[in-house]
Amino acid sequence: MSLMPDSWIRDMAQSQSMIEPFVEAQRREGVISFGLSSYGYDARVADDFRIFTDVDNAIVDPKDLSEASFVERRSDVCIIPPNSFVLARTVEYFRVPRDVLVICLGKSTYARCGIIVNVTPLEPEWEGHVTLEFSNTTPLPAKVYANEGACQFLFLKGAAPPEVSYADRAGKYMKQQGVTLPRL
């Protein structure tokens, strides 16, 4: 597997619509950086948030996570309660090529504040807005800024395309729009 450079990411974003909207150079003036980097793409978090709440003493069940466990907010800033989490999504829509696996890592700016970003790998031929999970590991409220950098995506090109892609097996999160809760 090869880690793909900025020139490949730019070409795929422009010729194959791999990332939309695509920001060709890193933007960082007064914001948490986003856009194309040397070996990755720093995506932004949209202004659509689902804040976890325990008002109804809900059970966190990955097979049946209730919408009632979340409060919806659309804002430029999201406050994550202490020791809690928020679901959000990327501004960018991704279309992963058949011979590529995409890994996501959190931004150091958030990690150094105890805010961890988690995303599972984007599989070959998956497409959609990426649902992001921000965990506040601190005992204090924490801020996440909409339309600013949230995480970095790294593109790993396989030696050959897989026999079966995410699209081939009709994955349950294919072409997701907005913040998507777990599906069974």
Image (cartoon, rainbow, N blue to C red):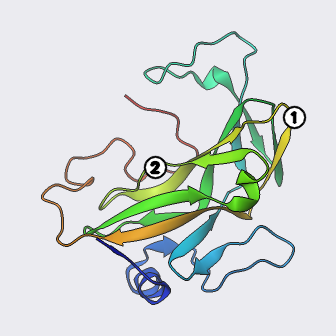
Name the amino acid, label 2. Gln
In the picture, measured across the screen, residue 58 lies left or right of residue 154, that is right
Report x, y in % for residue 61.
50, 19
- For residue 169, above or below residue 4: above
Classify residue 59 as left or right of residue 75. left
Badge 2 marks a residue whose secondary structure is loop
Q: Which residue is mark 2?
A: 176
Q: Which mark is residue 181?
A: none
The tag earlier along the polypeptide, 2 or 1, is 1
The structure residue drawn at horizontal position 77% and vertical position 40%, both measured from the top left corner, is 73
Seen from the viewer's position, the closer of residues 83 and 25 is: 83
The amino acid type found where label 1 is placed reads Leu
**Residue 24, located in which quarter of the rendered image?**
bottom right
Q: Could you tell me residue 56's position as x and y percent?
A: 71, 11
Disc ID at residue 140 = 1
Task: Give x and y (percent) for residue 46.
Answer: 68, 56
Neighbour class for label 1 at 10 Å: few (<14), some, many (≥20)?
A: few
Residue in view at x 52 percent, y 56 percent: 129
Q: Quadrant of the N terminus?
A: bottom left
Q: CA distance from mark 2 to mark 1?
A: 32 Å
